[in-house]
Amino acid sequence: MGKKRRAARSRRVEAPLAAAPAAPPAAAPAARLPRSWLAAVAGLAFLVRAAAAVQLGRTALFRFPQLDSLEFLLWAQSIARGEARWPAVPTHGPGYPYFLGALLALFDGSFAAVRLVQAALGAALCVFAALLAARLFDDRRAGLAAGLLLALYGPLVFVEVSLLAEGLLMVLLIAAVWGLLRPSATPAVSVAAAAAAGLLVGLAAVTRATALALVPALALVLLLDRRRPRRALAAGAFAAAALAVVLPVLVAVRQASGSWLPIQGYGGLNLYMGNRPGAPGVPTARRGGAWDLLSGEAARRGVAGTAAQERWYTRRLLAEARERPGAVLAAVGRKAVWLLQDEEIRESHSFYFFRERSALLRFLPGFALLFPLALCGLVAAIRGRRLPPALAVYLLVFAASCVAIVVSSRYRLPLVPALAVLAGGGIAWIIDAARARRWKTLGGLAALLAAGFAATQLRDHAPSRNLAEEWAATAMSLEARDDLAGARAAVDSALAADPDSALAWAVAGRLAEREGDAARAERAFAASARLAPDFQRARLNLGAALRRRGDLAGAERELRRALWLVPGHPAAQRELAAVLVERARRAGAVRDPARGQTLAAEAARLAPGEAEAWLTLALLALDAGDRAAARAALERASGMLGPEAPPVALGWALLERLEGRPEAAAERLRRLLLRHPGYQPAAQLLRALAGEPGRRPG
């Protein structure tokens, strides 16, 4: 490159530091990235993601996921089978499950093929970021730098080959922003581009609900853009296209859940978790107690229904904000600090667990490199009046969503492509300043880089680096596939990482049960409940173990606590019902049928689908002489087992005897014995009827 050409480029890139022009140019020039450069960016991004997927493929938790990835996978697999049924309370938007379901159907359930397609999506994201940076800074080097930086960003690489929604979310969003910033040859093309961008943002919103805020925000940007032809029509087309995607999903969620929800549930709960007084601003409510205590609070207060519970958490936060505004503001401030830290805070699984299992991920850069460079690019874009409102709104919406709700690695991730775009401009600026030996500029940039780097080093999040939870989840995945030896080794690793992990002890107890060691299982469950008194699963498992040992009082205590923590939990209700049934039988055996009837009635209420509870209630009601209660219970048991089932038929015979109809009872017993000649309770009752005074022998 000749000296004159280098000088011209230097003046163009240094322009942002000079006095800003009085008004933005009518149409910004655009540097074109050579196709070979774009191919290099895409190729590198794809190869890095494919290599990471291969390395992580040896990790059980990557192959057989838990938590969010498992929820996505189960929904997607039902879609691939042709089932259109939605979860009653969708914890995630349907965009990614339908995308994943289509891939599973297309590739015959191959996870490897899914990960390669997602790697290709990641490569496309890098290309869009490169094009956006080149256009924003009018410098193809900025585009190349942005694309390469994004291609090598470690946390993004991991997420894009995992069964998670953020990879799809980001490519939809950045493609939409790129489309909005492309120059339009005609007004018709401008309106069509706005509609296409609206469609992409709508798809992003049904993938993750936090993108919903972009719909009105970007529509307003279009409406206020005086340089855009037919801006009102473009804004309307954008909003209409987005709503055409979003509104049917809102209606479908309403039909599935019975409540109006913003795409997915738990928004109010997350808002409260991140902002309540004393909250650190990160997802501290984990499996092992804190989550059960927090998520069940609305139900424990008698609030029923998903939408009502979401409103309850929101109202409670507002009430606490009025009472203690300083504490809530402090929580928001902590989140603002966490947003900038070079820490990948665990939401479902810790990034650091997978980074240890991939030699590639260990060496890829993260936020500490990205943020300082983006800070330089942001200064250049603002001073040169090159920061497009659409990109600024994008950054503000996703930064605000983290600060308003909760900060975690995946919640912050949508900011990364936009920061990479700015970082590309920062890199080009540094290169030109160095080539031109502008020492004063370089000094200012060095100070800016140092300040940005320092801002990312203020806090460490030790819980995200404690990997006991991931080892315990690995054990759960292996146990589900009957690899008990592998699961035991994973539990040992979990307890070595953290001997006080309640989750690890709970999984250890389950493994001991499967290995037939009831005493060891009970000790493990007791340890889990002691370490985390509010861990519902530990209480449930311990209660079930105590019931099997015959300690009904201890079992009832643990199971009632489990039901208090998570009201309406089906497994806890069934276990407690079984305990109450046994206690009811014991009460009947000591001639206290009234007490037994009370216990059996509670058991039937807790587990209305358990015929054993209704049969026990019927027999105890008969002993207590309560014919109406006995008849109602027998009708419920008949509906489940059929009126000819031996214990049900025996119950009806007993009721007929109590009602003074011995002939009907005897006839029913004779029919029962013809079908089941060895059923001794029926034979004994028939003999008793024959021996009663005034009765005809059977």
Image: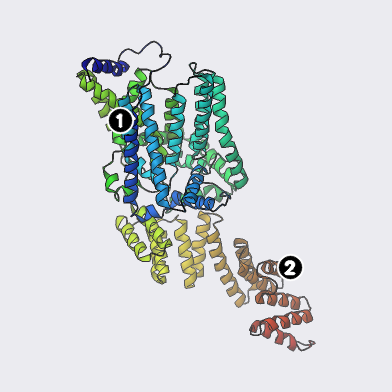
Number of residue marks: 2
Q: Where's the N terminus, which quadrant?
A: top left
Q: Using the rendered view, name the quadrant where residue 567 is placed.
A: bottom right
The single residue placed furthest to the top in the displayed view is: 22
Q: Amino acid at mark 1?
A: Ala
Residue 22 shown left or right of residue 82 in the figure: left
Indicate which label's residue lies in the foreground, 1 or 2.
Answer: 1
Reading the image, the residue beneath label 2 is: 628
Q: Where's the C terminus, which quadrant?
A: bottom right
Q: Nearer the viewer, residue 599 or 412?
A: 412
Q: Using the rendered view, name the quadrant where residue 574 is placed.
A: bottom right
One can see residue 528 in this view: yes
Q: Are marks 1 and 2 in contact (CB under 8 Å)?
A: no
Element type at marker 1? helix
Task: Name the N-terminal-most of marks 1 and 2.
Answer: 1
Q: Amino acid at mark 2?
A: Ala
Residue 633, position as x, y percentages in the image = 68, 67
Q: Nearer the viewer, residue 58 or 19?
A: 58
Q: CA distance from mark 1 to mark 2?
A: 80 Å
Q: Nearer the viewer, residue 214 or 239?
A: 239
Residue 440, position as x, y percentages in the image = 21, 18
- 680 to 297, vertically: above or below: below
Disc number placed over residue 510 in the picture, else none: none
Residue 153 shown left or right of residue 604 in the figure: left
- Disc 1 crowd, CA 10 A, few/some/many (<14, 14-19, 20+): many
- 613 to 671, vertically: above or below: above
Residue 253, position as x, y percentages in the image = 59, 43
Residue 308 shown left or right of residue 218 in the figure: right
Disc number placed over residue 145 in the picture, else none: 1
- Disc 2 crowd, CA 10 A, few/some/many (<14, 14-19, 20+): few
